[in-house]
Amino acid sequence: MNTGRTVFSQILDFLPMQEFRKCVARYRGNYKVQHFSCFDQFLCLAFAQLTFRESLRDIEACLRAIHPKLYHAGFRGEVSRSTLADANENRDSRIYADFAQILIGIARMLYRDEEFGLELDQTVYALDSTTIDLCLSLFPWAHFRQRKGAVKLHTLLDLRGSIPTLVIITHGKVHDVNILDDLPLQPGAIYVMDRGCLDFARLFRIQQSAAFFVTRAKRNMNFDRLYSRAIAKSTGLQCDQTVVLSGYYSRKDFPEKLRRIRFFDAEKNKHLVFLTNNFALPALTITELYRCRWQVELFFKWIKQHLRIKAFYGTSENAVKTQIWIAISVYVLVAIVKKRLNLDESLYTILQILSVTLFEKTPILQALSPIDCKTSEGVDCTQLNLFD
């Protein structure tokens, strides 16, 4: 009989429990709670994310089926659908938001030397958002369209390791450009964003913070060319100019020089115009930086496909935010496990293995290590031969 620990309990060893208790105490999450703590709630929703549970009833049925194993996996309270629903409704989602930021800080330290396709010393961030559609009659607080509800995940992604550095959850009507007001700017870092974030007053704030931005220009942008740099047109570059804005309001918002780069993408047969305040990097590097912004789109696609953030276990704003923050925590936790165990498998593969081995009493490194499926030759077989 294997008396070892379950894979789930071994994963919990990677959680900074002291920091989690601080987050709970900060918002008095366990005030007057006797049987079902904030950590029990976190474990239930983390279990739901790792095993792809569809509903509260699904979570309850599966956890009760393995009731004898729950205590050794870290559960201390009785799991019931109504108790979990009440916790999602009433426990402050900021507990899990703060804890997710702590996990993000740990993951960023582990992935700080990762490559992302360009050899740059600066930290590079990609800023974008994704929309999660909701039923307006069930989620009346999630304003988006007249007959449609939605929430937006505004994400600042560190391209080294694809770790979400900042996640802001809003209703669907909040425009991407407004998130630039809440962005903590890091001097020397490069912020890559789509032209939906093109606001010259906000971009000038990045300039004044000694940071850099790369974005796309709009077609109706008015500017005056000061001078041009030499380019190699065989690379797809069409111009590399230093410009100033000529519109009254735009020049008032951004009174300094800008760099304008025009590039022809032969694969997509498309002309692209980039704006940046970085005059040191080669023009082709600027275009490659914008191409690397696609990693944030892949991040959104990944979490939507492999985490439960499109179907929600509760309808209140607090319940939705709690589920999203715990989903992000699970994503980052799997990334931490991958790095600390030096695993070569992708996050997708690790997540799939965990979904079927979570309550197996197997050493976690053995459970997540690749299995050699090749049959060994020359092994004696005790099965009788039918044909001589």
Image (cartoon, rainbow, N blue to C red):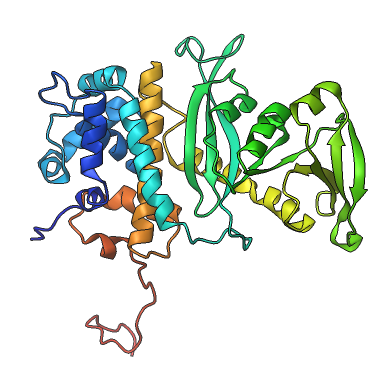
Image x and y of residue 277, in percent: 73, 44
Q: Is residue 280 above or below residue 156?
A: below
Q: Which residue is depicted at the point 23% across and 29% down?
A: 24
Q: Quadrant of the C terminus?
A: bottom left
Residue 115 sits in which quadrant? bottom right
Give the percent coordinates (x, y) of residue 288. 71, 54
In the image, residue 292 above or below residue 248 = below
Residue 28, by quadrant, is top left
- Residue 330 in sight from this viewpoint: yes
In this rendered view, identify the residue nearer to me: 96 or 71: 96
Q: Is residue 361 above or below residue 180?
A: below
In the rendered image, residue 374, in percent from the top left (x then y), is placed at 39, 76
Taking the image as drawn, is residue 52 in sight? no
Q: Is residue 55 left or right of residue 382?
A: right
Nearer-the-camera pick, 23 or 327: 23
Q: Total label count? A: 0
Please give left or right for residue 318 compared with residue 15 in the image.
right
**Left or right: residue 25 compared with residue 115:** left
Q: Find residue 118 and report its image quarter.
A: bottom right
- Quadrant that contains the N terminus: bottom left
Q: What's the residue at 88%, 59% (across, down)?
A: 231
Q: Where in the figure is residue 13, as x and y percent of width and height?
A: 22, 51
